[in-house]
């Protein structure tokens, strides 16, 4: 989201409340169809990677390139054959538990409070106090790091967006992260579209998928450093930087915070003018190109990454697939 100003770039804003609602675990049953068993296994695989900080992308139960890449990196760091596949040794190291990966969550009033109008007009957005989610399935998708399609599959016949406080919904159980290691530096791989966190022992401590600019001319030409971390940021819409927007606006507009803010729930400003890493209002587009130049992550990954950083943390850029990079 290059060349756009983020307000309050010198301080942290409030953080969304952590998930403290207990889930009633739904254990697997012997008579479960093979397709449902495979879905549980896929969800458990992705949840386990998410827990240790190796992002599988959005949790959807469908194991794809993002999950395989994260698995291969976990295997490399732990001295296992780097296949990207879930062999028994890797499953044991990740503590994968398909029998206890789904739970029944009780809808809270706080979930519905996250829903608000999200107008298409930038001028209308600027007149709001907060940009909330458009529907309950988006709230739950962010809370449980999953796709709306997965929620629908886990709750057949249930109109999720019509649920009220006290109603129950089946979700993946996403535990609190095991740790938030401090970064010695971070590496943005423009080819893989991933951000790697390297700790003080020069080990890979975390991996997050991101989106990068489609126009190669907008990719950074040199390394930088973190200059600020802002949670729940305001955003300044500058029509001069959005040539594709045909709406007539009087000038720069302040866009309020919230999950549907253009930079999501977190902004990590870099020393390179116009560049930063940030959340997104559209998590299901993560890993694709199309950004104006910044590096987009899911809101939950952006917040998790932010806890590992401080002003001054070096940021390095590479543009080769990790398969040809030297082993760390």
Image (cartoon, rainbow, N blue to C red):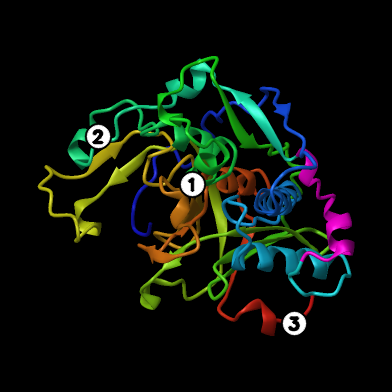
Q: Which residues are magenta?
A: 86-100
- Residue carrying label 2: 126
To which quarter of the image does residue 118 belong? top left
- Residue carrying label 1: 149
Residue 85, placed above or below residue 117: below
Point out the tag, 2 or 1, that comes first from the N-terminus.
2
Report the front residue among 293 and 115. 115
Element type at mark 2: helix
Q: Looking at the image, which residue is at 44% across and 48% down?
A: 280
- Disc 3 from disc 2: Cα separation: 47 Å
Element type at mark 3: loop
Q: Looking at the image, which residue is at 46% across and 18% down?
A: 164
**Label 1: few (<14), some (14–19) or many (≥20) C-alpha neighbours in 10 Å:** few
Q: Tags 2 and 1 in contact by the CB under 8 Å rule?
A: no
Whether residue 11 can be seen here: no
Residue 92: % across, % down: 88, 55
- Residue carrying label 3: 326
- Disc 1 from disc 3: Cα separation: 38 Å
**Any magenta on residue 137?**
no
- Disc 2 from disc 1: Cα separation: 31 Å
**228 relative to 2 in the view: left or right:** right
Foreground: disc 2 or disc 1:
1
């Amino acid at each position: 989201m290059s060349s756009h100003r983020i307000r309050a770039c010198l301080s942290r804003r409030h953080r969304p409340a952590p998930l403290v609602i207990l889930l009633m675990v739904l254990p697997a049953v012997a008579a479960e169809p093979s397709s449902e068993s495979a879905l549980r296994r896929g969800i458990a695989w992705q949840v386990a990677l998410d827990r240790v900080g190796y992002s599988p992308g959005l949790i959807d139960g469908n194991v794809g390139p993002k999950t395989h890449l994260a698995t291969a990196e976990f295997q490399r760091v732990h001295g296992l054959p780097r296949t990207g596949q879930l062999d028994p040794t890797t499953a044991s190291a990740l503590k994968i538990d398909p029998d206890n990966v789904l739970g029944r969550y009780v809808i809270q009033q706080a979930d519905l409070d996250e829903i608000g109008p999200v107008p298409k007009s930038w001028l209308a957005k600027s007149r709001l106090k907060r940009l909330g989610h458009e529907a309950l399935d988006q709230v739950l998708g962010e809370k449980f790091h999953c796709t709306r399609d997965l929620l629908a599959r886990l709750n057949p016949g249930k109109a999720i967006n019509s649920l009220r406080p006290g109603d129950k919904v089946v979700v993946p159980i996403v535990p609190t992260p095991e740790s938030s290691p401090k970064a010695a530096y971070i590496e943005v791989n423009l080819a893989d579209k991933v951000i790697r966190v390297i700790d003080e022992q020069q080990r890979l401590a975390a991996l997050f998928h991101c989106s990068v600019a489609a126009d190669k001319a907008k990719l950074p030409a040199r390394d930088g450093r973190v200059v600020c971390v802002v949670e729940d940021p305001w955003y300044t819409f500058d029509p001069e930087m959005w040539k594709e927007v045909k709406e007539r606006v009087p000038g720069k507009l302040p866009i309020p915070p919230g999950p549907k803010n253009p930079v999501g729930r977190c902004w990590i400003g870099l020393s390179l003018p116009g560049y930063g890493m940030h959340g997104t209002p559209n998590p299901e587009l993560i890993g694709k190109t199309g950004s104006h130049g910044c590096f987009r992550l899911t809101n939950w990954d952006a917040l998790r990454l932010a806890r590992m950083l401080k002003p001054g943390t070096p940021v390095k850029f590479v543009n080769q697939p990790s398969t040809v990079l030297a082993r760390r």
